[in-house]
Amino acid sequence: MNAPTAAPPPAKALRPLDDVLAELLGHARPLNGAAWPDEQVSTFEADGRVLTESVISPLQVPPHDNSAMDGYALRAADATAAGTVLPVSQRIAAGEVPVPLQPGTAARIFTGAPVPPGADTVVMQEDCEALADPQGAPQVRFAKAVRAGMAIRRSGEDVQLGSVVLAGGQRLSPASLGLAASVGRAHLQVARRPRVALFSTGDELVMPGEVPPEQLPAGAIYNSNRFFLRALLLRMGCEVTDFGIVPDNLERTRQTLAEAAQGHDLILTSGGVSVGEEDHVKPAVQSLGELHLWQLAIKPGKPFAYGRVAQSHFVGLPGNPVSSYVTFLMLVRPFLLRLQGVQDVRPKTVALPAHFTWGKADKRREFLRVWRNPQGGLDLFPHQGSGVLTSAVWGDGLVDNPAGTTIAPGDLVAFVSFTELLS
């Protein structure tokens, strides 16, 4: 008599993405403090880094009232009628120190030059005619009546003395670097870069260049995840150590995890976090530390793991390329930002009209690959499978579609651009 077959374990309930993200961020302690000292870097080299202190302006920007264009500076009361002619008493270029303006005269002035004391307006040269008196002295005729305050950039209209120009905890952009330089900052205090160990698992994986396509063994695939995950990590400002491909072997997986935990803040893997007999990442992590295996209520991307190996965080992504790509953007990206001290880590969405039909409501929240067309709407990539990486190249963003929702042409949907997610 055969023994009764054991009942399969009950399926785990799928967890909402927002709940998992909140729990994941709860584990992300910023990499600043005594154990992880900040770094001072040249402002030239600080693009993409995260400030750990606010930048306070020690000056006004601009430091003085200056001309917004080439033209003539004068008192508006001296040219209240069109056709007024005034003598030109001085010439002021950017960087020069003007003398007080003589009443009843104008000053030739150039963009960025300080407005002379006594002048209250600047008229652009297109509304002026340069003349000379009988002795050859310069004059100017104003084509229109003049009013006070024209074409003057006021001292401090960009930055006020003592104001916070860049707040600690924000990620620096090229414009941020220019703003820091405008208040005299040659160096900035930033969070240390996260150190990430990366590896893929799977006997089926082959690196491009090792085997030509025509000789690829049956069942083998090229390792695409390794390439885009490394690139994504670098874009997030990480220092990456690539541990390559780990075969489907428990002991080799344990050895690699133990080695990767040395000197890294995060271990990131793709594949091997499901429940198959050849998925060895789960038991290997559990034997070295702790593991939380979550089934996400999103599509693409369902298996997702978080844990600790020694002092390192561990994140395991699904093996299917688009699943791995989307879960990185939705979960790993905000986690890495929070490690660097950024508080606002959620991507920003905009409402745009769908120019497609999506009639297959799913019980999971879906991230559809779309393209923003010239008409301002969104076109859908025809193949939304989790292995179709073409969709992430063709598309320029994702539609965040709530569970159980169909989409008809003209419906407003939540769009998040890859530009937002990859910056």
Image (cartoon, rainbow, N blue to C red):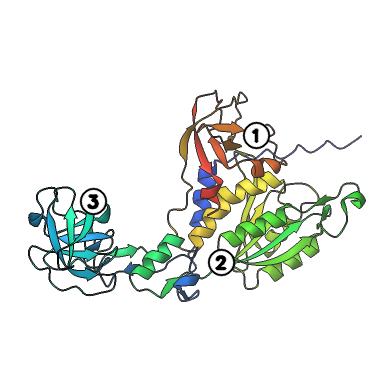
Look at the image and tell me whether residue 276 can be seen.
yes
- Nearest-to-viewer mark from 1 and 2: 1
SS type, badge 3: helix
Type of amino acid at the residue the image marks with label 1:
Phe
Sequence-wise first label, 3 or 1: 3
Mark sitting on residue 202: none
Neighbor class of circle 1 (other Cα within 10 Å; few <14, some 14-19, many 20+) is some
Mark 2 — residue? 194
Type of amino acid at the residue the image marks with label 3:
Asp
Q: Position of residue 349 (x, y in %)?
A: 47, 41
- Nearest-to-viewer mark from 3 and 1: 3
Q: Position of residue 405 (x, y in %)?
A: 55, 27
Look at 55% across and 26% down and name the residue there: 407
Type of amino acid at the residue the image marks with label 2:
Pro
181 lies left or right of 155: right
Mark 3 — residue? 127
Question: How many angstroms separate mark 1 from mark 2 (CA)?
Answer: 34 Å
Neighbor class of circle 2 (other Cα within 10 Å; few <14, some 14-19, many 20+) is many
Look at 56% across and 52% down and name the residue there: 422
Look at 22% across and 55% down and name the residue there: 129
Query: As rendered, which of 220 and 264 lies closer to the eye?
Result: 220
Q: Please say if the residues under marks 2 and 3 sit with CB atoms less than 8 Å apart.
A: no
Mark 1 — residue? 381
Query: As rendered, which of 300 and 354 lies closer to the eye?
Result: 354
Q: Is residue 205 positioned above or below 159 on the image?
A: above
Examine the image and state in which quarter residue 14 appears: top right
Q: Position of residue 125 (x, y in %)?
A: 26, 56
